[in-house]
Amino acid sequence: MTLSLKQCLPVVVAGGLLSPLAQISLADNGNALEEIIVTANKRESALMKTATSISAFDSATLSELGIDGGQDLVAHTPSLSITTFTVSIRGVGRPNLAVGSDPGIGIYWDGVYNTENGVFNYAQFFDIERIEVLRGPQGILYGRNSIGGAVSFISKRPADEWSGTATGELTNYDGTVAQVLASGPVTDDLGVLVGLSDIRRNGFQTNLYNGKDYEQDGTQYGTFALEHQTTSRWNTNLKVMGVEQKYRPGNGYILEPFKRELAQQVTDVDTGETLSLPGMFPKQNFVNMRQGLANENPALRDEDKVRQDVDPDLDTSRWAAFVNSEYSADTYALKYTGGYSRYWFDTTVDADASVQADSGVDWSKLLLSGVPVSQFPGAPGYTVTPADMTYVINQEATFDSHERSTPRSGTVITP
């Protein structure tokens, strides 16, 4: 008799809590530990013998625990944190959101370095065989940008016999999930895997100004993989994927009252140093865009309500290919890992989170040394300025990666 996953007890190994992959099970011949194989150290090894603080989840465990996105992975992985733009482990990650800054956590997909966080939410991991989260510095094996750790995704390979799965789900907010995955042999040496995913959801944050809903999702994902066993020692895997995300995100959740009062000039009570100009908060270099706003923040009554005149938008597309080819000799192995990725990202955010017609900075009431700013030479010919601040980000990038290695005997990843 074998205990089911829910009946198993976690054990501690390598300085961390072992994931449910390595649970205590009872075999017919007595108590035995289920052997879990990971590749965290760039070679196949049993999880119990891997000297790394690691959490590993295979496809069965992902399904058992209901892990189908980044936040589900966070809930089951100690010290892991994932936001829209950053990933951190033990508090170490990207230090800021500045363009060009280096992340502190390396993300790898089939051994190829990945620069984007979207992989956590493309298709509910339906084509992922295993996820490994390594805690602590991984620079020796994974290179730069892994000072805090690494997250490695290993894709499913074509099956030895034809098989497939079809999944349909109805979720909250009129959401739907439709996924199909099929794989099997084409010839004795060639296997193929094909998968399609479509995920949709209506929004739950409402704009009171125009009645539109935010947090809407529409993601289409496709994958195609080939595995060729050229000889008994030479194995090659190719994975091609594409994703198109059309998402109307929420415009943030501001749960505090707007500061609508006029911000006058502020000086230091001890030194008399000027800390701000009229209309600006101390140590800031822009006018408070919500001064004179006619309406209070609607989220104070309902956190899912906003009032703004620019609708947020996020459109992401990505095409990628990963190749792993390995020749295994008796005492050495030659391996090539290559990747190519084309990425598009467009987003729009209403930075002032308000309606232009509701707002207005009254320059006649903003005083500089007791004199209204509107009376100074060169001041605007009007006294009221409506707030209209929008962030627009457009990014297009192409990445390619090539890696060749010759592991010594005992460090070979066998096909």
Image (spheres, rainbow, N blue to C red):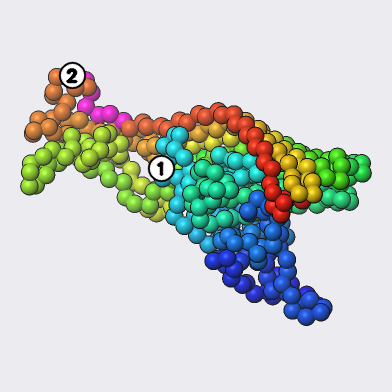
Q: Position of residue 144 (x, y in %)?
A: 51, 42
* Magenta stretch, residue numbers: 381-386
At label 2, the amino acid type is Gly
Is residue 415 placed above or below 72 in the rendered structure? above
Is residue 251 placed above or below 24 in the rendered structure? above
Examine the rendering and report whether any part of residue 130 can be seen: no
Front one among 401 and 411: 411
Q: Name the mark on residue 96.
A: 1
Instruction: Classify mark 1: residues with Cα within 10 Å, few (<14), some (14-19) or many (20+).
Output: few
Decide if residue 294 is on the left or right side of residue 167.
left
Q: Position of residue 203 (x, y in %)?
A: 56, 46
Front one among 97 and 151: 151
Task: Locate residue 320: give its quadrant.
Answer: top right
Q: Position of residue 151 (x, y in %)?
A: 58, 50
Task: Tell me the element at label 2.
Answer: loop
| Residue at image mark 2 | 378
